[in-house]
Image (cartoon, helix red, strand yellow):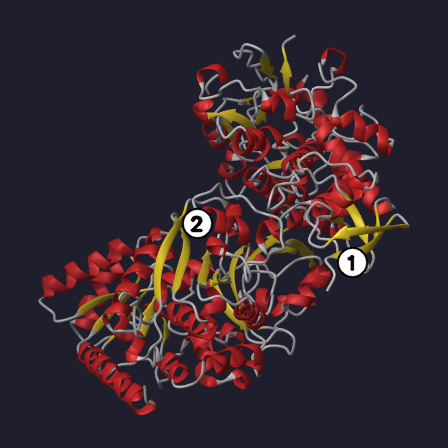
Amino acid sequence: MKKEELHELYKKLKDDAEHKVRLGEEKPRVLVGTATCGVAAGALKIRDDFQREIESKGLDVDVVEVGCMGHCYAEPLAVIAKPGYPPVCYGYLDDGLVHRLVEDFLGGDDPSYEYALAALERNDVFPTFEDFPRGIYEQKLILENCGFIDARNIESYIARDGYSALVKALSEKPGWVLDEVKNANLRGRGGAGFPAGIKWEACIKAGGSEKYVICNADEGDPGAFMDRSVLESDPHLVIEGMILCAYAIGAEKGYLYIRAEYPRAVSHVEAAIGQAREKGLLGSSILGSDFSFDLEVFQGSGAFVCGEATALINSMEGKMGMPESRPPRLASQGYRGKPTVLNNVKTFAYVPMIISRGADWFKGIGTEESPGTAVFSLVGKVNNTGLVEVPMGTTLRQLIYDVGDGLPNNREFKAVQIGGPSGGCLPEESLDVPIDFDSLHDAGAIMGSGGLVVMDQDDCMVSVSRYFLEFTQHESCGKCTFCRIGTKHLLDILTDITRGEGDSDTLQHLEELAEDVRDGSLCNLGKTAPNPVLTTLRYFRDEYKAHIEEGRCPALVCRDLILYYIEPPKCSKLCNVCVGSCPTEAIFTREDGLKEIDQEKCVKCDNCLKACPPEYNAIVKLSPPVLPPEKEKKTK
Amino acid sequence: MSDTVKITIDEKIIEAKKGEKLLWVALQNDIYIPHLCAIKEENRPNASCRLCFVEIEGVSNPVTSCTRNVEEGMVVKTRSPVVDRLVKTAFELLISDHNLKCSDCPANRKCALQKIAKERGLKLRQKRFKTIARDYEIDDSPEEFAFDRSRCVLCGQCIWADREEAKVGAIGFTNRGIKRVVTTFEEAPLAESICTQCLMCVEACPVGALYYKK
């Protein structure tokens, strides 16, 4: 097929899409963020509220569902785009605010800037997201469209030059696509950072005519939601990336392995696949060329280990989702024994822009060894939680304090957990580590799939590492000895430590076992499971020692090592809020009218501490769990 | 090109067929490497017991010899501090989840775990890890044999015998993580399953989990 014909065909598609999108934009529009994060915060109700209010006012306004803009802390969110005004984003929506916005802005001419979060386009009236402190650091590549386009409408993707990379690629040889991806040094975003181009090349070299492209969307780390957001908010970007990969390696069939717990991602991707087929962008003879490729969604059943490549393949083939020894690598023997490329959602999402804008452009972003951006779901004790995208090489300090705006209530930073259950906890001293695959690895953590949890002085590092071990131990498939039995013992030892049990050998046993599980396990779940233990032991060993040697939990978290105590000088006879808050009736009024906790009855639920009015602030947690001596006398 | 390669294991020069796995080459040449789950005929090694670690010159970390093809000029050490440490831990982990009443066990003195302990100077009583408490019931429904899960090391030898040799398919692995067990469909007693009681699984069991009643 001639280049001109191809471009002609695409031009028609694009003109058509632009026309439809422009028609829609002539009217005022309300874009409601209804990715899972928005829905969880009540976005569907907000959407209905808008529709109802608009209808009752008899206005001609379209309510459109878009994905996640990354400002999860302010959900539910909506953008109002009214001709004549810059599009403005409003956060923390409720029915009252919706009513007001419809009446004053859509029905009138007051954009109610006092409720606005930011404008989306530069203007003379109101700041944009780029003017936020985080805007200086953020560079949105794969999140560029997220939250701004209708994910269920292919036209809104095409109107923004969507599928133009495919057109460009189809007018070149497949080898050119491979070279671009290789030259861009695109490293896999699933966690390990293996160069995608080298993987693809190995798959080509494996030969044979039957090959597969699979997208790993089995995101399962607690606190991570980047892949889900991309699939929900801009599914065509990933689909286009997969088509480009298929073209490069010569595959005719591909799958997106999406966990069934992501129903919105599944439905958006399935809708997107259908629309791409209709437009001739998927299926046989794509855009009239002799290249054919089709996609299907495979829903995973939620086992964390199925994110591991060989377990994922087993699961797709109808076997138990358990890992196999490697080699053979997937590139030579993958799905159905055929050469297979398996990449993460984000890895595929970078491919269209690398093809469109070139490898050199991509290499100009980030660091030399880790070009491009890093996408994080920033959560925990940080002011601005959400989805952020920063160039590789940004330091953790910039990410937490500038992008995330620091910790709430001036809390003291303690650690940041990166990479989920396979990652590690880094302390204050590591905050100036640049974020890239190799630096994080050297610090003991991993880039992982991009979960980033900020922790403060109230987080106990032993409990945190116990939490992650509980997760991996639960998710262990049980195939190999180290992971099956080793993680169980790691968890048991950690549980003992949170109870103050253990002796001088305990930490050494724990560390040695953690190292052996890391070195001896069959697959990467087991190999990386000890990382939370190893990094906390490396950076927070004193905290472990305090538990074992002094029976003290410095963060006052471990229940067996704390007690709740009402300080008599601060307690008031006039107040008995705590008494009512106690579910076990452990708090009683003493003869002098002050309150006291019966330690035998106390279940350490924390209710009283929360209930005690701030003017008294009389309840404290003590660790080790010993009552102050003079007070003890009094109670007897 | 010849179809044999020369390798060195523990300073012994050995000629081996190309494509063979290191573990079997070593064992054929009377060099002992601990192993439980390895099955020579299996195409893709199970590699789950994690006992057959060796060190190969030029490879930074110990590797399981059951998964490694022999290569010309390979220099292998079956013992080294790192290998011994991993094998010891793997062994002690298995022991921590194993019924250690050896005197009551029909496999006493011919048990693979005892052999590993003897060959590698490891103790059957370990103190590093707590014993994992189990309350398994013995399935003595078959006429001639019984199955005691408290002795099972999950090596998979019985499943291979059942499926690939006897071609029955009565047993398989079920559950995940620490709850993984060998069982029948719907966990029925063996006698009520499609088991033909051909005894091939009993012969295959390297420990005393599947054993003759008499």
The chain ID associated with circle 1 is B
> Height in image: A364 above or below B35?
below
The answer to whether marks 2 and 1 sit on the same chain is no
Depth order, front residue of A27/A205: A205
Q: Which residue is drawn at 30% across and 86% down?
A: A6
Instruction: Please state which amino acid type lies under the numbered disc 1.
Output: Val
Q: Where is residue B22 in the image (x, y as percent from the top left)?
A: 75, 48
Q: Which residue is drawn at 63% across and 9% down?
A: B213
Query: In the drawing, what numbered circle is on residue B88?
Result: none
* Side of B128 where A119 appears, left or right: left
* Side of A121 where A458 appears, left or right: right
Depth order, front residue of A20/A418: A20
Q: Position of residue B192 (x, y in %)?
A: 44, 16
Residue position marked by numbered label 1 in the rendering:
B59
Q: In which quarter of the image is the N terminus of chain B?
A: bottom right
The chain ID associated with circle 2 is A
> Height in image: A184 above or below B24?
below
Q: Position of residue B151 (x, y in %)?
A: 66, 21
Q: In which quarter of the image is the C terminus of chain B?
A: top right
Query: In the drawing, what numbered circle is on residue A316?
Result: 2
Depth order, front residue of A538/B187: B187
Q: Which residue is drawn at 33% across and 63% down?
A: A77
User: How far apart are labels 2 and 1 at the CA level?
Assistant: 32 Å
- Mark 1 Cα shell of 10 Å, populated few (<14), some (14-19), many (≥20): few
> Height in image: A538 above or below B119?
below
Residue A184: which quarter of the image?
bottom right
The residue tagged with tag 2: helix, strand or loop?
helix
Give the number of callouts.
2
Instruction: Please state which amino acid type lies under the numbered disc 2.
Output: Met
Identity of the residue furthest to the right in this view: B11
